[in-house]
Image: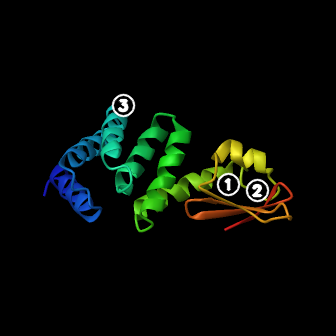
Amino acid sequence: MRSSSLARLTMASVLVMTGCVNPEAKRLYEEGTEALTENRVDVCIDRLEQARALMPDTSSFIRNNLAICYYRAGRRQEGWFEVRQAVMMNPSNDNAKAHFELRWQEFVDAGVLAIGTSRERVRSVLGEPDVLAVARGKGDETWIYAIRILGFRGGALASIK
């Protein structure tokens, strides 16, 4: 089987598994993913943004591929947001989880997630958390980014899970 035939078969399987039944979204996803494999970033972003607009809450595969394209285009904040959305939509999407962990490790390597880092520094790099919980009267906060939990005490990072 030729690699292009295998790629189409794989894409079709992913689309069926993820419930991407909108024919236009399917076409756009396929075009965007093909552009991604060919490193045609502008086309990839255009097609996947259109596919996401048609299926904003249901395709973590579209959002993960869009995140990859955003990162390749240097649009890191948008990529970070999309990969988190992909993981939260479908925690079983192993590609999205691996991509999320890759990006998380970049934050670790850059020292952003070191114990003692200020809440403001973390927020300036990672953006607003997906979930924020505050303990009354203690000043403790718990921030969740998709599948990772950060604990803050006294305005500084105290724990990472």
- Separation of disc 2 and disc 1 at Cα? 7 Å
Task: Name the kind of residue labelled 2 in the image.
Answer: Ala
- Separation of disc 2 and disc 3 at Cα? 35 Å
Label 1 near label 2: C-beta < 8 Å? yes
Work out which quarter of the rendered image holds the N terminus and state it. bottom left
Q: Earlier in the sequence, mark 2 or mark 3?
A: 3
Judged left or right of residue 20, residue 39 is right
Q: On the image, numbered disc 1 is attached to which residue?
A: 108
Q: On the image, numbered disc 3 is attached to which residue?
A: 42
Task: Name the kind of residue labelled 1 in the image.
Answer: Val
Q: Position of residue 156 (x, y in %)?
A: 82, 55
**Callout 3: 10 Å neighbours few (<14), some, many (20+)?**
some
Judged left or right of residue 71, residue 23 is left
**Callout 1: 10 Å neighbours few (<14), some, many (20+)?**
few
Instruction: Decide which of 24, 156 is in the foreground and name it.
Output: 24
Question: In the displayed image of the protein, which residue is found farthest to the front?
Answer: 136
Instruction: Decide which of 35, 141 is in the foreground and name it.
Output: 141
Q: Position of residue 61 (x, y in %)?
A: 35, 55
Numbered badge on residue 114: 2
74 vs 93: above or below = above
Q: Secondary structure at mark 2?
A: loop
